[in-house]
Image (cartoon, rainbow, N blue to C red):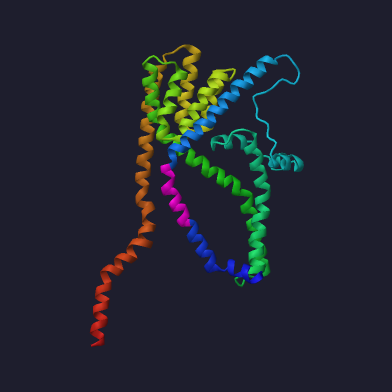
Amino acid sequence: MTVSLTALFAPENLLTIFVAVVVFATLLSIINPMMARSSLENRLKSVSTRREELRRKSREALASQGRAGSSTLRHRDESLYKKVVDRLDLSRLLEDPKVAEKLAQAGFRGPRPVSTFYFFRFVLPFAFAAFIAFYLFVVKDFGLAPQQRALFSIAGLTLGYYAPNIYLSNVIQKRRESIVGAFPDALDLLLICVESGMSIEAAIQKVSQEIGGASIELAEELTLLTAELSYLPERRQAYEGLAKRTNYPGIKSVMTAMIQAERYGTPLGAALRVMAKENREMRMAAAEKKAAQLPAKLTVPMIVFFLPVLFIVILGPAVMKGMDMMKH
């Protein structure tokens, strides 16, 4: 058993596993766009289920108004993660006041993702530290002193504590990029729908159906916005909720304009036209910024990958010819 574990954790075998994971991730990134439509349908279906639940809970709350123990619009989490979190009081020990907001920005809604986050934030430090300690003390020590191996184990403890936040930040960043990239087009579609005489709810629902091919995440958020406009006590809460979930200045300004249009009766079409122009300019500025950063980012890859191959192609024939001449 020890021999098999040693062979498994040998550096060459770990390198093979790493290459296999990279190849799998590459194939997954190629195949994933082909499955985008199916993912869109599933997400819109889940949002539709959420809308129906909001409707049912709203009716139950109205029916039981004034009675003790009336129903609320909140989900109840009865998973194993929730039981562990409550038993160990992890929500107080590992308290993060912004965790619910971050999870909403990553697309995770309800109380269950909060329990899952706290559970993995508690478990992963011990898992990382145990894995590193087992590898360095049992499998291969790489000639390190015991103090150094213990230090690496403590570093694994720290890495495991911050791993959930790192993963969450990565998901938030990718989701925001998808939403921001398609939002100016969605705003143009929304302007056309509003100026054609559609209500704001019908216009948002129509745009969510049309924009799904460009951004599944934006389609999901707009569909959820339509549901919240219908069933939340104040429409302002729905607009502010979308602004918080996206955390993007352009979307925040559009939501503020919609709130002011409903509160003061100002023309919504004119505000949307100005906001659409501003968001297109912001997207163009972001693209120009990325283009300006490209030469600096390409410097290291060119030095590492392109120049050695170029030198081999140019100098290779001359070196081979010189070697032949030396032999003769």
Residue 307 quadrant? bottom left
Which residue: 41% across, 14% down?
Answer: 267
Residue 65 visible to the viewer: yes
Q: 300 or 73: nearer the eye?
A: 73
Give the vertical position of 270 relative to 31 (above or below): above
- Locate the C terminus by quadrant: bottom left
Give the vertical position of 169 relative to 196 (above or below): below
Which residue: 39% across, 33% down?
Answer: 282
Which residue: 38% across, 62% down?
Answer: 304
The main secondary structure of the magenta stretch is helix
Q: 251 or 82: nearer the eye?
A: 82
Percent coordinates x, y for residue 293 in the rendering = 37, 47
Percent coordinates x, y for residue 174 in the rendering = 48, 41
Specify the segment rendered in magenta. 22-34
Give the vertical position of 50 relative to 306 (above or below): above
Total labels drawn: 0
Residue 98 visible to the viewer: no
Point out the residue furthest to the top here: 265
92 relative to 55 in the view: left or right: right
Is residue 214 one of those drawn in magenta? no
Percent coordinates x, y for residue 52 in the rendering = 57, 24
- Locate the N terminus by quadrant: bottom right
Give the vertical position of 212 relative to 139 (above or below): above
Which residue: 40% across, 26% down?
Answer: 187
206 relative to 243 in the view: left or right: left
Q: 127 or 275: nearer the eye?
A: 127
Percent coordinates x, y for residue 207 in the rendering = 42, 25
Is residue 24 one of those drawn in magenta? yes
Residue 137 quadrant? bottom right
